[in-house]
Image: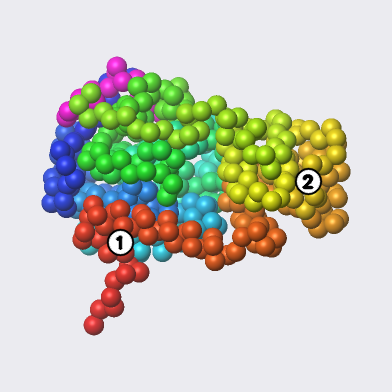
Amino acid sequence: MGKSVVSIVKNPSAPDAARIDEMVNQALEQLGGLGKIVSPGDFVAIKGNFFAPYPPPVIVDRRVVYSFIKALKAAGAGRVVLCEAVSVGTKLGRGQSTDFVLEEMGIREAAQAAGAEVLCLEDDQRVTVPVPGGKNIGEINYPRTLYDCDVLIDLACMKTHAMTLVTLGLKNFQGILDDAQKYYAHRDDFEQKIVDIFKIRKPDLTLIDGLIAMESNGAGEHGVPHPMNLLIASTDVVAADAVATACMGIDDVMLVATTRLAQYDGIGNGDLANIEIVGPPISQVREVFDLPVSYKVPIDRRLTGLYPNVDVRIGGACKQCWGLAAGIARTLSLFKDRNFMLLVGSDPKIPGPLTCDLDNVVVFGDCACAATGKVKELRNRMLLENKGLLAPGCPPYRPASARLEEYLIARGLITRETLEKGNRKAVEKTYAYYKSVDPTWVPKSEQKPRG
C-alpha cells in the first residue's frame, strides 16, 4: 500500500461562514481537487453525522454541509443526496426522528439551499448485500442510495466516544445500518462490525468536521465542546481517522480499535509514518483531549465497591455491560433510603440470601436474563410476583434504560416531569453554546412563522 494523503486546514480562530467556505475548498484542493473524485453528472451520496437532536459538536456543522455541497455542485456533480438516520438511542431514548433532527438543526435547509436532496435512510429502499470476508456480520441491509451512487462521501465529526474512544469517519458508517443491525454487536466485537461495513464499499472521500470537536464522555450531549477550527480530508478513511486521532492528542493511534482493525483488514492505512500530510503538520495543530472516563480508569473502578446501597453481582460480563451497568448503579445509588441488587453478566453469583427486597432487584442485559441456577430461580420469582426489573438487551442500552426509567417512575422514585426537565436542560445547554459560536443559527423550533 502506497502513502495515503491527508489534508489538514487550520484556522487561528472560530471561522465564520465565508471562511468555512474557503477552508472546505482548501481542504479539497490540497488533495488535488474534487475533479479527481467527481466526474460531471455523477450521482453523489453523502453519509453525514446528524444522529441526535443537538447542534455541533454533537453533529456536523450546517455551514460545512452547505459549503461542501456547493463545492460538489461546482465540480459538476449531478444529483447530490445528503443521507442520515438517527441512532437507536435518539429514537427510543430522546424520542426524536431523523426528520426532526434535520429540520430542527437547519441541516435540511442548508443542504437544499446548496442544491442537494435530503434523505432519511429509514425511507430508503434497502438491498441485502453479503460482506466479503466479514468477520462479525455476514450481510448488510445496505441503503440503496448509498449502494448505487457513483461517489460515496463520508462527512463525519471529530469526537471522543465512550465505547470506541473516538468517533470519526469509520464509526460514522454505523449509521447506514437499519435499527436491528445497529443494535447488533456492541460487545467486544463492535469495532469489527464497523470495519466489516467497509468491505462492501469504501467512501471515495472522507471529510472530518473539527471546527468544534468534542472531548470527554462523548459522543452525545454528555461530551464537552473542544474548539479546534480544523478540517481534515482524505480519500483514505482509515488515514483520515488516524490523523484526526493524533490531532486529538492520542499519540498511539492504534489504541483506536476501528483504525487498527481496518488497517489489518486492508481497508486503508492507519500508519502515521506512511501518511503524507498536506497543510500544517500534526504537531502544529495537535491538542490534548480529555478522554472518556471509560478509557481513563480501570473498568471496575466505575461500578463495583462504590455504592453502599447497590449490591453489584457481576460475572462474565463484556466491557460494554460493565460500562452501561456503571450508569445504572449510579442512578440507583441516588435513592439512598433503599437497597438494590444489580445482576450483570452470564454468571453472576448469589451464594446467600438476597440483600434487598425482591422489588429492588435489577437483572441487567441478555446474559443475566438468560443465566441459569439461582439467577434463573430468582428471575422466575420476579416474574411470578411481578416484582423487580428484568432489563434484557445486548447491549442493554436504550431499551433497557427505558425500562429502568419506567420502573423508577412506577415505584414513585422519580417522575416523568423530572426526566423531561433533565432533557430540556441538556437541550438548552447545547443550544446556548452553539449560538455563542454561530449567532446566525436559529433552531426550527424558535423560528417565527413567515408571513
Is 36 part of what is drawn in magenta?
A: no
Indicate whether 177 appears above or below 106: above
Q: Position of residue 194 (x, y in %)?
A: 48, 36
CB within 8 Å, label 2 to label 1: no
Marking on residue 356 = 2
- The quarter of the picture where the N terminus appears is top left
Q: Residue furthest top?
A: 273
Q: Tell me: 425 left or right of 55.
A: right
| Residue 384 rendering spot, x and y as whole percentages | 86, 55
For the residue marked with disc 2, what is the amino acid?
Cys
Q: CA distance from mark 2 to mark 1?
A: 49 Å
Q: Residue at (35%, 63%) from the top-left corner?
A: 104
Q: Give me the residue at 16% from left, 51% from top.
A: 16
Residue 450: % across, % down? 25, 78
**Badge number at residue 71:** none
Nearest the eye: 362 or 213: 362
Residue shown at the point (70%, 30%) measured from the top left: 316
Mark 2 or mark 1: whose residue is earlier in sequence? 1
Left or right: 74 with respect to 319?
left
Does the image show residue 61? Answer: yes
Q: In the rendered structure, which segment of residues is drawn in magenta?
A: 266-282
Measuring 20% from the left and 26% from the top, which residue is drawn there? 284
Residue position for label 1? 106
Q: Residues within 10 Å of mark 1 (few under 14, many from 20)?
A: some
